[in-house]
Amino acid sequence: MHARWLETAALALIIVSGILLVTAGVFMFKTDTIPEKEALRPHHSFNIVLIVMDAFREDKVGATRNGVPLTPFLDSLIENSAYFPNAVTNCTWTRPSMASLYTSLYVDTHQVVYDTHVPDEPSAYAALSPELDTISTVLKAAGYTTIGIQTNGNLFPEFGFNRGFDMYRTSLDDQATQVTDWAIKEVSGAKSPFFLYAHYMDPHLPYDPPQPYRGMMGYAPESLAPEERQIVENFRDYLMAFCKTKTGQLTRMPFPLLSEAGREAVTCLYDGCIRYTDDEVKRLVESVQEKAPDTVFIILADHGEHFWDHDLLGHGLSLYNCELRIPLFVFGGSVPPGTSERPVEIVDILPTVAHLLDLEPLDSWQGHNLFLDAVRPVYTKTRSNSPAWNTNLESVICEGKKLIMNRRDDTIQLYDWPKDAGEQTNLSEEAPGDVERLRGMLEAHHRHNLRARQSTHQETTIDEETAEQLRRLGYMD
């Protein structure tokens, strides 16, 4: 850790002690504009709450089912938050995506990739290098009490995601109610300033909302045949078989394909999980606000989810918008509300936190402060180290176009973005100039990431209990 960083940490401790004098200001800005750092009101050190909703599709914000809104709380935040409706993840699978959030590094730089144990292949898994600074180590050095509530086995201590946390509570298979209860309890006794990270797994497979939320969404429809209901309510095996068939691991689908009613039932359960998560996030936010009004909240997803979009299920195997786009809200403290349509990315979270705290960013960070009103290209990659899953995709979004490059077979897709939200019209043949320009950007980005590496690839092994949870989540065979 270099001298400048020690000086930055010392400055943060002075801020925490209340020695720094501040002045107040009032700011207004039009929709689609987020102000520059100079426009933000100077402030004392404040608490930070990071809420991650796993596998939460961006297009569920503002949606309804059965006449019921899916995200009433998130909807209420739009007018009172810095809201980024075109935010994207840097990987469409949890561990690499969260590694990018933690470190402000792209996938090729931090080297945490999509992996899964396959028979006859090594059972070592990509882990976050201990050599990398993370959001928790940065805030710990700045004098924060750091608290993590984690229910995704991919982010357990074995993978290095607990570094910098004073308390990192892990649990397998607990629902959102328990996550909120734990978070409220920990915050109630935490010394300020505190950093709380709470990870909600409920929108993730197996799509199993509490019973009241099933009824709220209108599940189960009368048109659903009993044999299909059995598949819907034990969807993990169907999804895994479907994905293995799509990737060539199986020659035929061992289940009968679900009817339209069956598909609708699956998404109905998912929507119940979305509403349940929204309710619990509301409960956590309101509880923290009551205890600690001087708190900034960051609410986002790590990635989205396929539900037969492009004839795919789950996540991690594509870079289409249903997986790529995520909700992103920042509010509280001196953060002024406003909507920015600019594409932004998960690597921008850590530099934004540093900006709000007036901490000097590290030279290694590859993201940018969200509040800089500048349009930049955004990049995403998903790669599997398992030949069975046959995935090596990269994408770039720039100047109204999105290019997806498949490094396995060198195929290219080009879409208007965000205009063609469903990515129905591949423009690659009719716009060769855009393809050449964006492909060149991807190649340059890839080379830059290789040069930016500060650590070697890390691997770890996991215990059987964690492995079993990952199997239930659809990550392992």
Image (tube, rainbow, N blue to C red):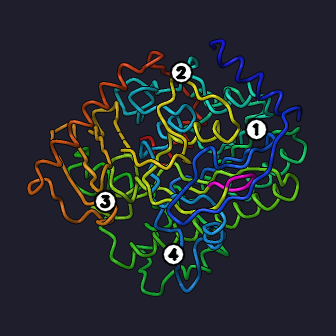
> Can residue 205 be seen in this snapshot?
no
Q: Which residues are magenta?
A: 330-335
* Of the two numbered discs 3 and 1 in the rendering, the one whose residue sits closer to the viewer: 3
Residue under label 4, please give it: 63
Marks 3,1: beta carbons within 8 A: no
Residue located at (63% from left, 44% from top): 38
**Amino acid type of the residue that numbered disc 3 sits on in the rendered structure:** Trp
Marks 3,4: beta carbons within 8 A: no
**Amino acid type of the residue that numbered disc 1 sits on in the rendered structure:** Ile
Which of the 4 image quadrants contains residue 134?
top right
Which of 7/210 is in front? 7
Instruction: Kindly state the secondary structure of the residue where label 4 is placed.
Output: loop
**Amino acid type of the residue that numbered disc 2 sits on in the rendered structure:** Ser
Residue under label 1, please give it: 147
Who comes first in sequence, dot 3 or dot 4? Answer: 4
What mark, if any, has residue 129 been given in the picture? Answer: 2
What mark, if any, has residue 230 been given in the picture? Answer: none
Who comes first in sequence, dot 4 or dot 2? Answer: 4
Who comes first in sequence, dot 1 or dot 4? Answer: 4
Which of 323/255 is in front? 323
